[in-house]
Image (tube, grey):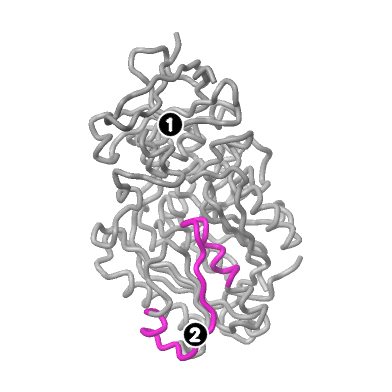
Amino acid sequence: MRSTGAAIVGIGQTEFSFNIGRSERTIALEAIRAALDDAGVSPREVDGLVRFNMENTTEVEIARNIGIPNLRFFGEIGYGGGGACATIGHAAMAIATGRASVVVCWRARNRSKAAGGRPWEATGMKVGGDGQFSAPFGLVRPVDQIAMVARRHMYEFGTTERQLGAVAVACRKHAARNPNACKREPMTLEDHAASRLVSEPLRKLDCCLETDGALAVVVVSAERARDMKNRPALILAVSQGTGTEHVVMTNYHGPRFLETPSVECARDLFAAAGVQPKDIGCAQFYDAFTPLVILSLEEYGFCPRGEGGRFAEGGRLEWPDGELPIDTSGGGLSEAYVHGYNLIVEGVRQIRGTSTAQVADLELCLVTSGAGVPTSALILARA
Amino acid sequence: MTGKGTIYSFVIAHPPVLPPFAGKTPLPIVLVQLEEHPSLRMIGNIVAGGGELAIGARVEVAFSDVTPEVSLPVWRILP
């Protein structure tokens, strides 16, 4: 087992809500201050900030408002939800190379129309780049792009809508235990099957929530983490990956249509950490749509290609008795959708032993970011 | 190129969609694998009145004039 030499020592967040009523800047500052308090670190000690490009608040407004006197490392990761775990990776690299000693990474989201609404709703009448080959035909929303992959997966491997539903049900069961989750009422496979169609074969309950909220984490060296107040979540490895024929959210061309960039990301991740999928006790899979979890089960090596649907059946993804409990705070499907940042914070809680669906004797937790886009993932360990 | 191919995958979009597509839902969107170049796939719409929408269905290209300057390829499902 190897390590990046860095650890997450502070986590903070706001409440999650369908209408939080405060600006992204305000909630970003709330989450960051909470994470620093949790770590027991003064804002004056922060010298690094890492964000990803879904984030609208900037390094300078954070530095100005929390009082960072010497911000000497900052950077932005691309590719939307694929970049969440990579922010932690860049923080760990900055610490390993001596460029920073206390790095804060964050995500704040207010989905309201005033704050920009859903990105796809802003599509204009002229589309350039990769989108010019899909948008004129109505393939605009992320759900349409993932539905295209899901349909082919069903055709090739016999994956069923009921298996997709099992992913949503597992997340909801975990959310029911989490007082911060936005959707906690019970959900059955029948509820999933009866929910309205959004992009066939996908239904409303295959899609993540649309919520507001902010989260932040504090990263320091593993050495410093030993003397801090919380049990550190050691960052074993962080990887980034992209496919060779990638277009928007899918490998539309070539022989690898059903493979996402998680294939490359997973290979590097496990090699860098020096562990195997069988060593992972809990996974926080990016779940913007249920088929992404099916694909991630395959691509992160928990089952062979094509068997992700069957793996999802029979409660195997459910805490406490499932073989691989996933998204133990409810994930994007039932806790909140903040481009995967809640998955990172839940991974830290699992390592600390403070999750509301705590996996017993957990040693290693996998966290993944947006599958389908150029992506990233990390493995956290008990120090 | 013969303009022929097969449907590799498809979705049917339901609301909410962008305003230009609002009157067209449920809207089938297909991914067509071209006969002469199987690793190249095109996203498109289908012409009404053809054969059944399914993966593996054979299709043939047609062109739809959206404006005097812009034509988009569309696909007719062969019986």
The quarter of the picture where the N terminus of chain A appears is: bottom right
Is residue A160 visible from the viewing direction of this image? no
Decide whether residue A78 is among the magenta residues: yes
- Frontmost of labels 1 and 2 is 2
Q: Amino acid at mark 2?
A: Leu
Q: Chain of mark 1?
A: A
Which of these two is toward me, A145 or A315?
A145
Label 2, residues with CA under 10 Å away: few <14, some 14-19, many ≥20: some
Image coordinates of residue A115 in percent, x first then y, are 28, 62
Q: CA distance from mark 1 to mark 2?
A: 48 Å
Q: Is residue B78 left or right of residue A101?
A: left
Which of these two is toward me, B45 or A233?
B45
The quarter of the picture where the C terminus of chain A appears is: bottom right
Q: Chain of mark 2?
A: A
Q: How many marks?
A: 2
Dot 1 corresponds to which residue? A201
Is residue A223 visible from the viewing direction of this image? yes
Say which element carries label 1. Answer: loop
Label located before the other in sequence (1 or 2): 2
Which of these two is toward me, A295 or A50?
A50
- Marks 1 & 2 on one chain: yes
Say which element carries label 2. Answer: loop
Question: In which quarter of the view is residue A309 placed?
Answer: top right
Which of these two is toward me, A356 or A69?
A69
Above or below, A335 against A307 in this view is: below
Q: Amino acid at mark 1?
A: Pro
Above or below, A93 against A82 in this view is: below
The residue lying at 54 percent from left, 45 percent from top is: A293
The magenta stretch is A61-90
The residue lying at 47 percent from left, 58 percent from top is: A340
Dot 2 corresponds to which residue? A71
